[in-house]
Image: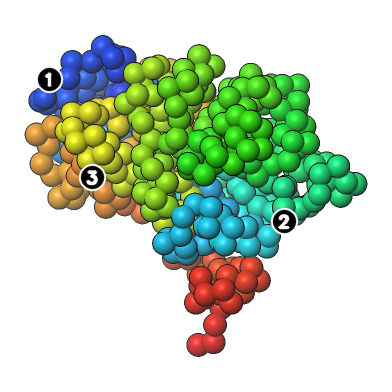
């Protein structure tokens, strides 16, 4: 055995493998034991999962291997956050009492106009600490900015590489406010946007754990010319796509006026659903929309915390899953959540559905943990690599241990979903590399990164006008 071989031990190992489809699951209330190995361990070798079995068995076979975990905690696959905006990494705490349209115009627009590649890299590294300490090993990011020509999105890849996280990165441009349709200026804008997509695709090609998707900020935020150019490029290059879809009710009305149809049928009509697509939110979908998403294999990223903060509505998660739509969970951006705590988003995903439907069994703990792991991986087309602890998959592993949050384990699945917090995250491995140990991030020095980002926060607050507009107190005299 090489030095990269080790065991991760837990009172329970939640493999998230071999689970029945949602419509075939036994819904009888009780302890969730599907895919659970009691007194188990995971054998990792050279970055891959080799075996999952009882600890005593694996220890007898490999007596000399190092062991992580004292047998009291919970081992599970790394969590997959299927939707966020690291463009908001340095903008938490602003506009939380605004509706989505107000927030987008008043916060995201001014912020995106001043972001640089350095801001993206440093902000990503900062939020990577938060994500890793809440068990996230894979993140699907859409970096939204209007600082055209800055190639700011490439900084996200820089930051993810520093942190050791696995990721998928896209540029989410919008151009309807930047140029009049049919003008030479619009042509220049479209060309600049498409150049950044290509630059980001080239940058991710050299990053071992980071993949590319083409981003569409929102359909309504893009001119027809940019939408057409993006769809053509995605189809030509086989690019998967990350977008927002049916997020708020106003979107449907505005789309109806602009195109004579809602955004889901319009996305299908222009060919956007001809490539693999992750749709953020999908709150305001009709029955016909659900049928289209299911038929076209569109995956949905559910963002319960952001939907509540921005009063956007409640995603029909049970209806989507019953129709066969793959649904993952995301935190959404750091300015629309206002954190990257994935464990908080997982808990909220369950509670929001229960209170909305007034039905305690409409979703259960196993449903949402599935969404946060293997279904999140399926949504991103990465389920052959991550999302469950199975032989041959990459070793993205989380160990929860040492805190009262996971001290009582009558039902380990429910305890993770409803009781665990970032305090519980003792160790995290990405591709077999230890990136969190003893509840501390090893790849990014948290205190140093906080200090590095403080002047960037002040510069952004002043340069964007958000301080002058009353949305921030940063950058003022001391």
Task: Give the image location of residue 363, x and y in percent.
Answer: 24, 29
Q: Quadrant of residue 284?
A: top left
Disc nearest the viewer among 1 and 3: 1
- Residue visible at 52% across and 44% down? 250
> Which numbered marker is on residue 469?
none
> Which numbered marker is on residue 147?
2
Task: Give the image location of residue 418, x and y in percent.
Answer: 21, 42
Q: Is residue 6 left or right of residue 59?
A: right
The CA distance from mark 1 to mark 3 is 23 Å
- Residue visible at 42% across and 60% down? 96
Quarter holding the N terminus is top left
The CA distance from mark 2 to mark 3 is 39 Å
The secondary structure type at the circle numbered 1 is loop
Task: Give the image location of residue 164, x and y in percent.
Answer: 51, 43
Task: Give the image location of residue 48, x and y in percent.
Answer: 43, 25
Which of these two is toward me, 218 or 12? 218
The secondary structure type at the circle numbered 3 is loop
The secondary structure type at the circle numbered 2 is loop
Is residue 164 in sight in this rendering?
A: no
- Residue visible at 9% across and 34% down? 410
First in sequence: mark 1 vs mark 3: 1
Which residue is labeled 3 in the image?
Answer: 420
Q: As drawn, which residue projects farthest toward the top?
A: 24
> Which numbered marker is on residue 28?
1
Which of these two is toward me, 76 or 377? 377
């Amino acid at each position: 055995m090489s030095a990269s071989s080790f065991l991760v031990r837990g009172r329970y190992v939640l493999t998230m493998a071999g689970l029945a489809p949602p419509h075939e699951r036994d819904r009888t209330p009780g302890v969730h034991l599907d895919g659970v190995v009691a007194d188990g361990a995971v054998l990792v070798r050279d970055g891959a999962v080799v075996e999952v079995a009882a600890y005593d068995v694996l220890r007898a076979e490999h007596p000399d291997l190092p062991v992580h975990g004292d047998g009291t905690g919970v081992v599970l696959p790394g969590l997959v956050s299927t939707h966020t905006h690291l463009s908001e990494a340095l903008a938490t705490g602003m506009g939380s009492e605004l509706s989505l349209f107000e927030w987008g115009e008043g916060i995201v627009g001014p912020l995106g106009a001043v972001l640089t590649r350095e801001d993206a890299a440093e902000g990503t590294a900062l939020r990577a600490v938060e994500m890793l300490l809440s068990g996230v090993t894979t993140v699907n990011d859409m970096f939204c900015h209007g600082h055209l020509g800055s190639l700011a999105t490439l900084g996200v890849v820089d930051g993810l590489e520093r942190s050791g996280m696995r990721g998928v990165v896209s540029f989410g441009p919008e151009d309807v406010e930047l140029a009049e349709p049919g003008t030479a200026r619009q042509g220049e804008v479209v060309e600049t946007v498409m150049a950044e997509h290509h630059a980001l695709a080239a940058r991710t090609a050299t990053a071992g754990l980071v993949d590319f998707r083409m981003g569409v900020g929102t359909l309504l935020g893009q001119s027809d010319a940019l939408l057409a150019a993006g769809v053509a490029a995605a189809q030509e290059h086989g690019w998967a796509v990350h977008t927002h879809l049916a997020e708020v009710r106003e979107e449907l009305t505005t789309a109806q006026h602009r195109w004579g149809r809602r955004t889901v049928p319009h996305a299908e009509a222009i060919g956007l659903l001809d490539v693999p697509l992750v749709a953020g939110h999908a709150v305001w979908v009709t029955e016909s929309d659900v049928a289209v998403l299911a038929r076209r294999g569109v995956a949905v990223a559910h963002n319960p915390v952001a939907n509540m903060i921005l009063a956007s509505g409640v995603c029909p998660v049970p209806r989507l899953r019953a129709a066969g739509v793959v649904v993952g969970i995301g935190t959404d951006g750091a300015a629309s959540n206002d954190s990257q705590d994935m464990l908080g988003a997982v808990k909220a995903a369950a509670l929001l559905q229960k209170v909305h439907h007034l039905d305690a069994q409409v979703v259960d703990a196993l449903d949402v943990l599935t969404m946060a792991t293997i279904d999140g991986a399926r949504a991103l087309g990465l389920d052959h690599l991550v999302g469950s602890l199975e032989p041959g998959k990459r070793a993205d592993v989380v160990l929860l241990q040492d805190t009262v949050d996971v001290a009582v384990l009558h039902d380990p699945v429910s305890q993770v979903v409803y009781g665990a917090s970032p305090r519980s995250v003792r160790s995290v491995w990405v591709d077999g590399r230890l990136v969190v140990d003893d509840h501390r991030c090893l790849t990014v020095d948290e205190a140093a990164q906080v200090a590095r980002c403080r002047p960037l926060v002040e510069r952004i607050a002043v340069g964007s006008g958000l301080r002058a507009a009353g949305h921030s107190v940063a950058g003022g005299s001391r």
